[in-house]
Amino acid sequence: MKLKTTLFMSLLLASTASWAGGYQLQEYSVTSAGRAFGGAGIVGDDYSAIAFNPAGMTLKQSGMQLGAMAMDIHSNMNGHLDDGPRIGDKGKLRNFKIIPHGFGQYAYKNWRIGVGVYAPFGLGTYYNKSWFGRTHALTSEITAIDINPSLAWKPLEWLSIGAGFIFERMEARLTNSTNPYVRDGKMSDMNADGWGHGWNAGIMISPTKTTRFGIAYRSPVVQNIKGKHHLQHPLAGNLEGISSTKLVDPEHIQLTAYQEVGKFGLSAMARWTRWSRFDLLSIDSTALAPLGASPSQVNESWRNTWTISGGVDYHYCKNLTFRTGLAYDQGAVKDPEHRTARVPDANRWIASIGASYMKGNWQFDASYFHMFWGKARVNSRASKTGTSTIHGTYKTQINSFGLSAQYHF
């Protein structure tokens, strides 16, 4: 019984280890994506400042925008497990997700009031059911949706300040096989959700009409996740229970700069994210009670990260703008021992292009970027006390396409 308890607690820990991490998303501005998010929030050519830096809301009058970005993920994992004979194919991770967003604001003198709805965190990975690491991961779906009412004020010609409140809804589904020796379809299936709240704030300084600097802060958001856990035990049969854990979405600080030079706009961004908060994860599931299991913990030991980007806009004419950008995004997983099949995170480069077309009160945007991932090695257990260790290397590439429309009142 002790061996079975250890095995299935390990599977549970593997299932939930990526909840607070996942992929940090910033794909809620098609316009900004075209310049690799350089200057996000202070360029003033869309309404996404509500999310990036609410002080930048003062650069726009009343209006709204709707958009979406599509993420196309392709990844292959070659490797093996070292804890006994396993049956399975190499891992093929495929996913295509559409990430929508919407913003709107109203201008009154030197004040702006607005609201944004967007996804700051998310993960969607789907493995082939017969892959050799199916006890570590099959499906991972995590979505965090923010509702972000915000207020901005421009007390001086060169100074703007803004702040907002964040209501965040998180939903997740995580599955994995529970029988490592045969493909019998038995699974651990967890569905959970919760609400959290936080805030964001920013300052924008404009020493000249063509020069802007910004600093923005997003607070941590505490999530108390709770939901159903259905476990198909090869010997004990179907087990039902409640799973729960406490998660903290990390805070970040973002520095931005923007400079106009003739027909060109030069932008830059540096963002620090406190992923070290995702250090120790404690999980409880009443479905494991018949197996004699108790709440357990897993060490994640993620590191704080930096994202650095720069972009260039070329205003070809009054109605048409082209842009491009390059970014470096540091992975939160610091070594193969802490990289999991749920979150095969790694350092990556991002190259992007985009364009805007304006006609009357309308603006239409399109963007494309490609993520270049380094090879990500994995050498991790399903949990601290688990026996299943996965070894291998991920090769991943991601393409993203975006479209949006703005209407200025």
Image: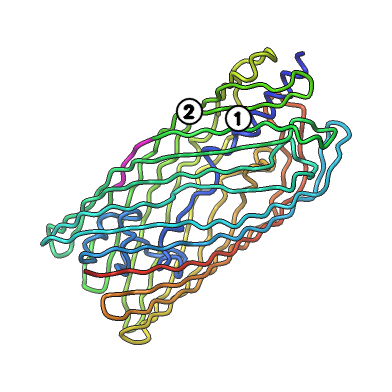
Residues under numbered marks 2 and 1 in contact, where contact means CB atoms less than 8 Å apart: no
Residue occupying image coordinates x 63% and y 34%:
15
Q: What type is the residue that disc 1 sits on?
A: Asn
The residues colored magenta run 196-200
Sequence-wise, which precedes: disc 2 or disc 1? 2
Q: Secondary structure at mark 1?
A: strand
Whether the magenta-drawn stretch holds residue 1 is answered as no
| 3D distance between C-alphas at marks 2 and 1 | 14 Å
Nearest to the observer: residue 319 or residue 212: 319
Q: For the residue carrying disc 1, how many other residues have a C-alpha within 10 Å: few (<14), some (14-19), or many (20+)?
A: some
Residue occupying image coordinates x 72% and y 18%:
5
Q: Which mark is residue 77?
A: none
Q: Where is the N terminus found, in terms of image quarters? A: top right
Please, is residue 237 above or below residue 111 in the view?
above
Q: Secondary structure at mark 2?
A: strand
Nearest to the observer: residue 87 or residue 377: 87
Q: Residue 91's spot in the image, x, y percent? A: 76, 49
Residue occupying image coordinates x 56% and y 34%:
191
Q: Residue 289's spot in the image, x, y percent? A: 64, 14
Mark 2 — residue?
Answer: 246
Please, is residue 135 above or below residue 309 in the view?
above
For the view shown, which residue lies furthest in the bottom direction?
317
Residue occupying image coordinates x 55% and y 64%:
400
Q: Residue 250's spot in the image, x, y percent? A: 44, 40
Q: Residue 87's spot in the image, x, y percent? A: 86, 40
Q: How many marks are shown on the rendered structure? A: 2
Is residue 358 toward the left or the right of residue 312 in the image? left
Q: What type is the residue that disc 2 sits on?
A: Lys
Q: Where is the C terminus found, in terms of image quarters? A: bottom left
Name the quadrant containing residue 355.
bottom left
Mark 1 — residue?
Answer: 299
